């Protein structure tokens, strides 16, 4: 029985802890880590671990490609805890903590969409009908 325990150690099935990226970019205004977005599933976080596999032949995994676009130019691979895929980090253009604008990165379409004309006309019609009903009862009960 002891032979079986040493052959199949319970700790072998435990997932390995991936190391954190030490050179994570920070906001120059508040100092918090920039929020990155997974390119596969869209999950956003500021705490993705480094992927087990990094590209070979790199002098430093924190260098950026000058010819690559700014959104995914970091030459490091991160691991998404949701979809469990490795991806190049794409950082948001605005700091989630203080709102500092970085000038580069993923932009979120902001603002509410304008109301369709049908909704505006329906609301105006209901308001006019309610006013007509109130005027009618006011004239009768006066």
Image (cartoon, grey):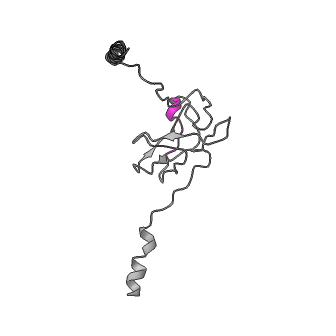
x and y percentages locating residue 94 in the rendered image: 57, 32
Quarter that holds the N terminus: bottom left
Q: Nearer the viewer, residue 31 or 8?
A: 31
x and y percentages locating residue 61 in the rendered image: 56, 44
Q: Nearer the viewer, residue 71 or 130?
A: 130
Q: Is residue 75 magenta?
A: yes
**What residue sits 53% from the left and 34% below the top?**
92
The image shows residue 21, relative to residue 17, as above or below, that is above
Q: Nearer the viewer, residue 79 or 98?
A: 98
Left or right of residue 100: residue 6: left
Q: Quadrant of residue 64?
A: top right
Total labels drawn: 0
The image shows residue 99, relative to residue 54, as above or below, that is above
Q: For the stretch drawn in magenta, what is the main secondary structure?
A: loop
Q: Is residue 9 magenta?
A: no
Q: Is residue 4 visible?
A: yes
**What residue sits 56% from the left and 28% below the top?**
104
Quarter that holds the C terminus: top left
Give the residues in magenta.
69-77
Left or right of residue 79: residue 33: right
**What residue sits 55% from the left and 40% below the top?**
35
x and y percentages locating residue 57 in the rendered image: 53, 46
Left or right of residue 34: residue 107: left
The image shows residue 8, relative to residue 102, as above or below, that is below
Q: Nearer the viewer, residue 64 or 19?
A: 19
Left or right of residue 68: residue 85: left
x and y percentages locating residue 53 in the rendered image: 47, 51
């Amino acid at each position: 029985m002891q032979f079986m325990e040493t052959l199949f150690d319970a700790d072998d099935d435990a997932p390995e802890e991936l190391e954190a990226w030490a050179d994570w970019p920070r906001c120059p205004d508040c100092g918090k880590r920039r929020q990155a977005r997974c390119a596969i599933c869209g999950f956003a976080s500021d705490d993705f671990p480094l992927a087990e596999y990094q590209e070979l032949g790199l002098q430093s995994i924190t260098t950026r490609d000058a010819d690559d676009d700014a959104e995914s130019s970091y030459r490091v691979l991160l691991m998404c805890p949701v979809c469990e895929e490795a991806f190049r980090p794409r950082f948001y253009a605005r700091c989630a903590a203080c709102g500092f604008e970085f000038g580069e990165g993923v932009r979120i379409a902001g603002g509410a969409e304008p109301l369709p004309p049908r909704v505006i006309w329906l609301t105006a019609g209901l308001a006019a009908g309610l006013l007509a009903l109130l005027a009618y009862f006011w004239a009768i009960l006066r």
